[in-house]
Image: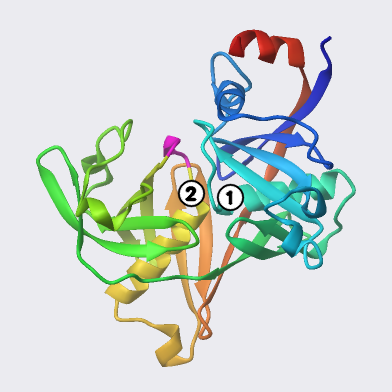
Amino acid sequence: MSTRIAFLKGHGTENDFVIVPDPENALDLPPAAVAVLCDRRAGVGGDGLLHVVRSAAHPEARGMAAEAEWFMDYRNGDGSVAEMCGNGVRVFARYLQRAGHAAEGDLAIATRGGVKHVHLAKNGDVTVGMGRAGLPEGDVVVSVGERGWPARNVNMGNPHAVAFVADLAHAGDLYTPPPYEPATAYPDGVNVEFVVDRGPRHVAMRVHERGSGETRSCGTGACAVAVATARRDGTDPAVTGTPATYTVDVPGGTLVITEHPDGEIEMTGPAVIVAEGEFDSAWLEGVLA
């Protein structure tokens, strides 16, 4: 017996997501189902999937339920589970607002990377507290073809390798994950950002997201890039006592990243819901059979 399952489509600086509301965690969404839904030809299409679940109803989020009613069960486009997605959190918050679960102002959202605090502004922008960046020690090198660059290892709840290049075209097509050394640096894979300067505290980036390929934007990646750029510039807010704000251009738009003296990082950018509809469970079952 087939059932109709509601979904929405949204994006944050063109990092796009299939949104599946499932407050009581009643849907079975195995990796193959997520991959089909995110397929741009055979499914709805998206860089990832936002499974919207009440924290109390999900075993991975029950411990955060007292602080955050809703859990972002985020999946990459290939169906794999991810700790966090910065653009995804903004779109998730916009969905909660649209659905009447949140109002303009502040709210908390549970993620595998911890509880994230969000502000829905009157002008439509969404600001997310992204937590603190980890800066693991050790040299990392990423490469594309015959070119290689030293990369800064940054952890934003998920791993990033940030490489400064002369031209964003040097990143190649980014269809496949750029190789990195040593292999032990990222046992679970890594998001790789290629960065060029645009002006004072202003950079542009391209990114290969593990499990998704090149995306139009990556929120945690933009945060990692801002932190790596600040350190390259000799700036550390914990030392200066002054926040450092960087503008980060991504192919899908612009994000503004601020690192505060206590290490907390805030990301501000747009989030848009563009469509909603239903898919038939029988279709999905047939595709997976």
**Does the segment drawn in magenta span residue 215?**
yes
> Is 287 positioned to the left or the right of 282 in the image?
left
Q: Classify 10 Å Cα crowding around label 2: few (below 14), some (14-19), many (20 and above).
A: many
Image mark for residue 174 = none
Give the magenta range.
211-216
What residue is disc 1 on? Answer: 87
Q: Please state which amino acid type lies under the numbered disc 1.
A: Asn
**Residue 120 visible in the displayed image:** no
Q: How many residues crowd mark 1 within 10 Å: few (<14), some (14–19), many (20+)?
A: many
Q: Earlier in the sequence, mark 2 or mark 1?
A: 1
Q: Nearer the viewer, residue 42 or 205?
A: 42
Residue identified by numbered label 2? 218
Residue 71 visible in the displayed image:
yes
- Residue 129, percent across and down? 62, 67
217 within the magenta span: no
Relative to residue 111, is residue 178 depicted above or below? above
| Residue 103 shown left or right of residue 228 in the figure | right
The residue sitting at the front extreme is: 59
In the displayed orientation, state which residue is furthest to the left. Answer: 146
Q: Return the x and y of residue 187 as percentages of the image width and height.
A: 33, 51
Q: Which residue is at the front of the view, 223 or 65?
A: 65
Residue at (73, 54) in percent of width and height: 124
Residue 96 placement (x, y as % from top left):
80, 48
Mark 2 secondary-structure assignment? loop
